[in-house]
Amino acid sequence: MKKWTFLLFASILLAGCTDAESEQSIEKEEPVEEVATTDIETDTEINGEDTTELEEETVVEEESTQENTDLFTGYDLIEVDGGDLSGYREANVVVDIGFGDREYWAFTNEHGQLVRVIAEKITLQDDDNEPVTSSGRYYSDEAKVPGVESDILDEGHIIADSLGGVSNAYNITPQESTLNRHGDQAYMEDAIRKAGGATNFEAIITYPDTETQIPSSYKYTYTLMGNEIVDTFDNINPDEVNESLGLTESEPSTNSNTEGDISSVDTNGNGQVTISEAKAAGFSMPITSDHWLYQYMDDRDGDGMVGE
């Protein structure tokens, strides 16, 4: 009995010593030293390279994406090949109709009519570095939008090949042939080419009803050399309009201000034509130096344009 009592007492004593040693070991354990870390959010270098520029580019890209998102609200963004000859357009969509990296945005309404085209910058065709045909076009043909089969209507570009536009249905409308080739449409395109491009471009296309794809009129707003230009014209033969206004006489001599009959334009008979008189006679502004009416007008800043 005494033997078992002794063993029990020895066991209790050893257990107490072990607990005491464990507690002493824990008390002597030193705290782990914290490792310094680098705040990567404020570090401007990654692998030795400055990331400031990358951060700025990201911000610009995010802003651009946000702007496009706001601009495209209510429209579905779709992709259409620039040379697609189909005349069909989807309703309520937006399509990039700029060739290459250009961003020219075309919008349709709920009836599939092309109603608006915008471009922050018009960049001219680069026939030295872009695939252009011998006729100066990106594609050999244009989209067959209903109406272009007419003998008097062309497959008219809203933004011409020479200005960087493609040839699918989102850039083509049936346009009166003379207007497209020699009238206000051609005049506008020529003015932009001569200026080396344009900015803040917007085209608003109007239709007589919701069924046709043949526009009744066009309104172009754009900036040339710091001057905002607004061209508005109907989708009709300008020669017929000029004839009705008595403006189809032989062009006057470029050497005299007294030759030729401009009485239908020069309403006050002083031999000079003001911007108001020219507009009232149906001429779109600006009048450039190669226009027959230019010699009768006052180009005060000498830039080759009147009415800009």
Image (tube, helix red, strand yellow):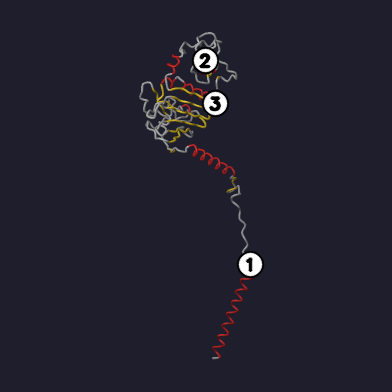
Q: Is residue 84 above or below residue 305?
A: below
> In the structure shown, which secondary structural element does the residue marked by tag 3 occupy?
strand
The residue mark sitting in front, 1 or 3, is 3
Q: Residue at x 54, y 40 (%)?
A: 63
- In the rendered structure, which amino acid carries the disc numbered 3? Glu
Q: Mark 3 points at which residue?
A: 228
Q: Residue at x 56, y 88 (%)?
A: 5
The mark nearer the N terminus, 1 or 3, is 1
- In the rendered structure, which amino acid carries the disc numbered 1? Glu
Q: Say if residue 256 shows up in the picture.
A: no
Residue 30: give its label. Answer: 1
* Quadrant including the N terminus: bottom right
Q: How far apart are marks 1 and 3 (CA)?
A: 77 Å
- In the rendered structure, which amino acid carries the disc numbered 2? Leu
Q: How far apart are marks 1 and 2 (CA)?
A: 97 Å
Instruction: Judge the density around disc 3: few (<14), some (14-19), many (≥20) Cα neighbours within 10 Å.
Output: some
* Residue 206 locus on image (x, y percent): 44, 27
Q: Quadrant of residue 166?
A: top left
* Residue 225 locus on image (x, y percent): 56, 26
The residue mark sitting in front, 1 or 2, is 2
Q: Name the residue under label 2.
A: 293
* Residue 76 locus on image (x, y percent): 43, 38
Q: Distance between the residues labelled 3 and 2?
A: 21 Å
